[in-house]
Image (spheres, rainbow, N blue to C red):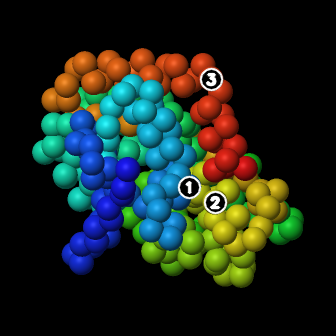
Amino acid sequence: MSLRISHYLSGLAIVLFNSSIAADLHAYTEDLPPLNYLQQGQLQGYSVELLQIIAHNAGINIDIEVLPWARAVATADVDPNSILFTVARTPAREEQYQWLGPISKRRIVLIKLANRGHIQAKTVEDTKKYTVSAVRDSASAKKLQQLGFILGKSLDLSPNDAISFKKLIKQRTDIIAILDWGAAWQAREQGLKYTQLSTLVVLDDDLDYYFALNKKINPLLFARLKAALAQVEKTGKIEQLRHKYFN
């Protein structure tokens, strides 16, 4: 059983598939640690491992392709045998896909360094007197702007979570808006314990994460995946994976 990796110069796109077995389904994702990410050319993450376990138990062969998110969405939309992940199930997306899950809570938090005791807030409104960093064009940044945070004053934008987190460590920002999954990952990457961070306010926890399947997918394959997920939930494996990636 061999894996082949392909790179496209027009943007990050890595295809992992079994070259000896035809895939029943194609899965598309982005680089979003620790849910789905690449490390030394290997595809890893909570959602990746969970999908592989579900597919194995369902007897379904899948290949997984990592793309910039907009391209992943566009590619999955035109592929009737596709799975898109990791996807927040929103009202706007409800009719676009068939949903497999939920597989995790989506929880965006406002976090500070625990040792910065002077930074205190009980509500999102309270944090406006500090500088909050968020990833540019992210759901977090859009939410903060909708709530009246002003760019250049109470709101600072970064190109990615890693840079936001480094700003937090260097005290170039007071607070960051980030997924709790992402905060745990970035802390580990920077050699910190999650206990060295302090959650001030939950910005958004109304949604859950799912695998989103194309509406034209073979209904028999969808049924097998649903049954396999239900079986995995009974084994405690999901909690084991969560502990592995969000410790």
Q: Residue at x 47, y 62 (%)?
A: 42
Disc 2 or disc 3, which is closer to the eye? 3
State the residue in front, 173 or 77: 77
Check if mark 2's residue and mark 1's residue have beta carbons within 8 Å. yes
Name which residue type carries label 1: Pro
x and y percent of residue 49 in the render?
51, 44
Tally of numbered tags: 3
Residue 186 higher or lower than 231, as above or below: below
Q: Which residue carries the number 1 mark?
A: 34
State the residue in front, 175 or 178: 178
**Is 51 positioned to the left or the right of 20 in the image?**
right
Neighbours of disc 2 within 10 Å: few (<14), some (14-19), many (20+)? many
Residue 235: image tag: 3
State the residue in front, 181 or 217: 217
Check if mark 1's residue and mark 3's residue have beta carbons within 8 Å. no
Residue 159 higher or lower than 226, as above or below: below
The mark that comes first in sequence, 1 or 3, is 1
Q: Label 1, label 3: how many angstroms apart (C-alpha)?
A: 22 Å
Residue 91 occupies which quadrant of the picture?
top left
Q: Residue at x 70, y 64 (%)?
A: 188
Neighbours of disc 3 within 10 Å: few (<14), some (14-19), many (20+)? few
x and y percent of residue 55 in the render?
40, 33
The mark that comes first in sequence, 2 or 3, is 2
